[in-house]
Amino acid sequence: MSHPAHPVDGRDSRRNPEKARSIEVAARVREFIRAHGITPDDRLPAERELAQKLGVSRAQLREALATLESTGEIWRHVGKGTFVNSPQAHDGLVEINKIARLTTPIEIMETRLLIEPKLAALAAIYATSNDLAAIDACLNKGLEATDPLASQRLGDDLHRAIARAAKNNLLLSLFETVYAVREATTWGRLKPALQTRAGLEKQWEQHCAFVAPIRERDAPMAERLMRQHIEYIRQEMNDIASGNIPG
């Protein structure tokens, strides 16, 4: 598996021993992947096991994995593990990062307002029984979540299940691009940490609200309530940015 070169400024590494160590550990991970014939979409050993095999601490390994994730060489799924990316996935990540540098949180929300209400309406029309079961499963898990990061991920899973239920591959592709760009922005990384319990409860009330008309095949209502939900998130984002964090 080939990846782009990773040039190292030797002078900078000498000035920053921790950075030099992280670069060294990242190189060990790459060599481990090559030596063990680990291919794209294969899972790496658990952190504890991999740190022991490489002879490094878990903290050093985590820093190296964060570097490899930022370059698109690996990807991590909470609860499932760390996986090797394909070169094509790396190219896609580079493009996502380029877009993220050129866009703003407001532009992301404007795009979501254009796409997601229509996806909700289409889901109300085209969702199969399996799609509805997947939507309900995401909703039920989200209603039980108390951790802000878990709640954010489960909310994303719910929106994604609705996007898939719409049965429109082009809109689904746009949806995935928008979410990937959001995650690549500072706002996307900070948002879960800034969420309040009241804000999370309000969002999940709205999730319940727009899922109901999808189940009932009421496309106009699903579209309207999804739009209200995205508008609420946009206002919440503006409040947080201005320092007026809801209680």
Image: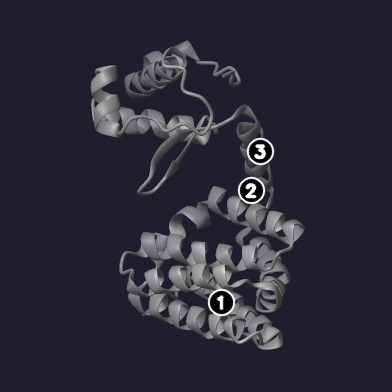
Q: Nearer the viewer, residue 146 or 245?
A: 146
Which label's residue is closer to the chain start, 2 or 1? 2
Mark toward the viewer: 2 or 3 = 3
Residue type, numbered disc 1: Gln
Q: Position of residue 155 (x, y in %)?
A: 48, 67
Q: Residues within 10 Å of mark 3 (few under 14, many from 20)?
A: some
Which label's residue is closer to the chain start, 1 or 3? 3
SS of the residue under disc 2: helix
Q: CA distance from mark 2 to mark 1?
A: 21 Å
The residue that label 3 is drawn on is: 92
Q: CA distance from mark 1 to mark 3?
A: 30 Å
SS of the residue under disc 1: helix
Q: Which quadrant holds the C terminus?
A: bottom left
Q: Which quadrant holds the N terminus?
A: top right
* 151 left or right, relative to 84: left
Q: Position of residue 159 (x, y in %)?
A: 56, 67
Q: Nearer the viewer, residue 142 or 191?
A: 142
Q: Which quarter of the figure has residue 150?
A: bottom left
Residue sitting at x 45%, y 83%: 205
Which numbered disc covers residue 235?
1
Which label's residue is closer to the chain start, 2 or 3? 3
The residue that label 2 is drawn on is: 100
Asked if marks 2 and 3 touch (Cβ < 8 Å), the reply is no
Residue sitting at x 44%, y 69%: 137
Asked if marks 2 and 1 touch (Cβ < 8 Å), the reply is no
